[in-house]
Image (tube, rainbow, N blue to C red):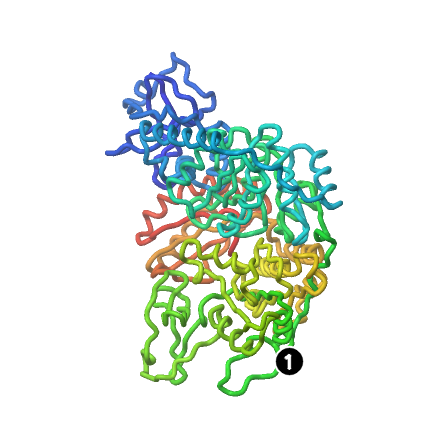
Amino acid sequence: MNRLRVAVETPAHAGLGDTLDYESEQPLAPGTLVRVPLGRRDVPGIVWPTPDQAFAPDNKDREGAEGFALKPVAEVLVSLPPLPSAWCRLVEFSARYYQRAVGEVALAVLPPELRKLDDAGLAKRMRLQDKRLAKAAVDGSPAAEPQRPPLTGEQAAVLAAFDSAGPACHLLHGVTGSGKTEVYLRLAEAALAVGQQALVLVPEINLTPQLEARFAARFPGRRLVSLHSALTPAQRLANWLAAHRGQAELVLGTRLAIFCPLPRLGLIVVDEEHDPSYKQQDGARYSARDLAVYRGRLENAPVVLGSATPSLESWHHAQTGRYRLLTMAERVGQGPLPSVQVIDMTQQPRPAPGEPPLALAPALKAAVEARVARGEQSLLFLNRRGFAPVLHCTACGWKSACPHCSAWRVFHKLDRTLRCHHCAFTERVPRACPECGNLDIQPIGRGTEKLEEQVGELLQGVVGPGGGPARVARIDADTTRLKGTLEQQLAAMHAGEVDVLVGTQMVTKGHDFRRVTLVAAVDPDGALFTADFRAPERLFATLMQAAGRAGRAAEVAQQSEMWVQTANPGHPLFAALKAHDYARFAASQLREREMAGLPPFAHLALLRAEARDAAVAEGFLRAARDEAHALAGTLGLAEHISLYAPVPPHVARVAGQERRQMLVESGSRAALQRLLAHWVAGLPALRTQHKGIVRWAVDVDPMTI
């Protein structure tokens, strides 16, 4: 009998260890999928590599050494090729670095449908997939050679530098409209030409169809698949199988796609690498961007991190030589970047008593009207959905607080509801104040739903070149809930059927709106003054990305503008924005980070805890801090580790659970990882001493503090 190490889906705090031992009549290669008994049921597992990959036949087995028999493997999924050894190493690194169990990560990143199938069911799926591929190959007619646009001088220089560098991590800093996607296409073309596969990551699902269309048009006849959570379980399994079996040559996906097994991986692209969506926020809290860099080194594949506003961590790595910096500073067609107009809202006409605040300053309103009259498009950005952030009573001061969260319920006028955007608790808007019965309940503030209404009223009587009224539309999470609605709305925008588009961050990233000549940030000030040290970086990136939606066609670039309505026009962030000077902004932020001892000059981890009672969560964290202090001393790490007191996060209560967090900081990544490895192992026992803890989790390299 052969003794096997098998990874099964058990959380790190279950006390079962990273892997479990089983026996098998035949030797099984690492990466083989199996089903094994665990308790009273059979569960999926993966044969995991051991340090020497095998046990010598004359070694004592565990039965003789430890007095119990190993359970046999229940089933082997022989139809599926074993997962590559590099994939196993990627998963093992992820589990170690982000403090999770190997099996928890390994099984969680597989398609859910795969974990349900036995070998017969899997074999049937694969036969059907092979038949469809064979039929498509027979039915497909020869495609015309796709038209490749001529390269700009900067694009050609970047590609030449890329060829001369060999496998490495490259930071492609290209302004919006500089043609980064064309660079990705040329690099993918080179990889495919030598029989390799290319993996392209995007931060959000709504960017996938647009990029998929570009790649499909450039590579007709090539097998391209996408991987993201909007796919059905069957679609996700089929696409994953095509990638794992080497049938798919191009894989486009969101952050989970970084774990897609690819036997001939030759290129990894991370588009909009600065985007926080690449960080998983539950389970194994991994960063797909950072894992892409690690996977590139692991599999000797070049990595391209692309952005107009790189993360400060990536920019720092490029400045210090860890990444190779490639720059494209000009737009395709040599068109200028939008000019930036900053409007001081403290100097605008004040509304009459009882009137709502100005939606658009007079100068901005006039600029939008001029665009409508010329048949051009405007985009108004407000990162707050709903009609108003809160309702309040003018008599007693009641506000629409969520009873389950430390947050307000947002007023949605279209369906007359108050909705919590944290726990989704929803009620109809009351006819009168629930506390005093006053009928005068008023909205405070403004969301995209209200802005859409206000802009529609402001533009009444304004007509376009065809004589029709101004057409206003909105794109946010509320208007795109149904499948296909986002695609329909974007298509209407591209077709010129919308004059003014109101939206949240969804409309500021990656979209190529050729008719947009004006973009306005209506109320960005909320992000200027928060406790999160990353807030300025995120706001600058968002505004730069939003500005990049204007003037993307050469014929309209000269009149393109970015407007910002702010009560803080003297803030240095806006000075850098007006100059489109990312390097200046980044240098300023990095100086502040270095003085404050913040990333990338320090390394952080958060221990988060949730309980019904805030005192229980705080007690658990204080005890955990005491344990960490003791461990730091024992391990000789005391001078390298800082441990802070437990504090509530920005939203301290969600769905009835009180949340607290404790920050761990170190100037040495190695020291932090060494402490975490010892510390996390003891937290399950500590939890049993603090009854009432609902859950706890460690977040390494957190994106929010």
Q: Where does the image place residue 694, in percent across and percent down from the top left?
A: 33, 52
Extreme-bottom residue of the structure: 353
Q: Position of residue 74 (x, y in %)?
A: 29, 26
Q: Residues within 10 Å of mark 1 (few under 14, many from 20)?
A: few
**What residue is rendered at 48% in x and 28% in y?**
84
Tell me, yes or no, if residue 358 can be seen here.
Answer: yes
- The image quadrant that residue 430 belongs to is bottom left
Specify whether 388 is left or right of 44: right
Please identify the residue farthest to the right as the structure is shown. Answer: 153
Picture residue at 49% right of the left edge, 62% below the top: 475
Is residue 66 positioned above or below 407 on the image?
A: above
Left or right of 384 on screen, residue 40: left
Q: Which residue is mark 1?
A: 347
Q: Quadrant of the N terminus?
A: top left
Q: Quadrant of residue 563?
A: bottom right
Using the image, determine if residue 276 lies above or below residue 325.
below
Q: Is residue 60 left or right of residue 382?
A: left
Q: Quadrant of residue 241?
A: top left
Q: Residue furthest left?
A: 40
- Along the line of sight, which residue is nearer the eye, 536 or 432? 432
Q: Disc 1 residue type?
A: Gln
Residue 97 is situated, as x and y percent measured from the top left of the image, at 50, 40
Comparing 572 with 78, the one in front is: 78
Residue 518 to residue 11: above or below: below
| Label 1 secondary element | helix
